[in-house]
């Protein structure tokens, strides 16, 4: 009889232990569900922050692209103006050389005229 009671007692303890274990597992599952919800909310918040940062980066990238395009256009304009100025300087250089030749010729003719004037005065 003692063995029968002992075995019934062990069965009851096993049943209590099983109920406790099931209760414990149930609480763990509940806590996991809560953590899952909290984690998902945090991930959603992070997703929103990442999306906002990406949008800001895209906006800045677009601004920088526009600035770069404007600078490229301005550089092309300046390059064209520099080329134009090079041609104008070369043309001006040629004109200055021509003027020097003409001035030398005028000086030579003027010197000859003075020489003629001096001779004519001497003849008088």
Image: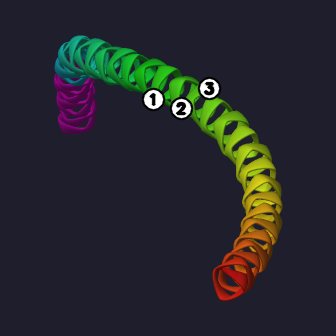
Q: CA distance from mark 1 to mark 2?
A: 6 Å
Q: Are marks 1 and 2 in contact (CB under 8 Å)?
A: yes
Q: How many marks?
A: 3
Whole-percent x and y of residue 90? 79, 55
Count neighbours of disc 2 (C-alpha within 10 A) and say few if under 14, some if 14 to 19, many if 20 or more: few
Residue that label 1 marks: 64
Mark 3 falls on what kind of element? helix
- Identify the image quadrant of residue 98: bottom right
Quadrant including the N terminus: top left
Of callouts 2 and 3, the N-terminal one: 2
- Identify the image quadrant of residue 51: top left
Task: Please state the extent of the stretch shown in magenta in the rendering.
Answer: 1-25
In the drawing, does residue 16 fall left or right of residue 81? left
Residue at the image point whose x is 63% and y is 81% from the top: 121
Count neighbours of disc 3 (C-alpha within 10 A) and say few if under 14, some if 14 to 19, many if 20 or more: few
Task: Tell which of 74 and 81 is nearer to you.
Answer: 81
Instruction: Indicate yes or no whether the magenta region holds residue 57.
Output: no
Of callouts 3 and 1, the N-terminal one: 1
The label nearer to you, 2 versus 3, is 3
Residue that label 3 marks: 73
Residue at the image point whose x is 72% and y is 80% from the top: 111
Residue that label 2 marks: 68
Examine the rendered structure and indicate whether residue 4 appears above or below residue 19: below
Q: CA distance from mark 3 to mark 1?
A: 14 Å
In the drawing, does residue 11 fall left or right of residue 101? left
């Amino acid at each position: 009889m003692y063995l029968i009671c002992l075995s019934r007692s062990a069965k009851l303890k096993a049943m209590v232990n099983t109920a406790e274990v099931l209760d414990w597992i149930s609480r763990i599952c509940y806590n996991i569900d809560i953590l899952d919800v909290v984690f998902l909310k945090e991930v959603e918040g992070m997703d929103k922050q990442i999306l906002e940062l990406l949008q800001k980066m895209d906006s800045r990238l677009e601004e920088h692209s526009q600035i770069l395009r404007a600078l490229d256009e301005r550089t092309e304009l300046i390059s064209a103006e520099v080329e134009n100025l090079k041609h104008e300087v070369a043309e001006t250089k040629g004109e200055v050389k021509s003027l020097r030749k003409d001035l030398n010729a005028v000086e030579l003719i003027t010197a000859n005229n003075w020489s003629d004037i001096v001779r004519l005065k001497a003849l008088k």
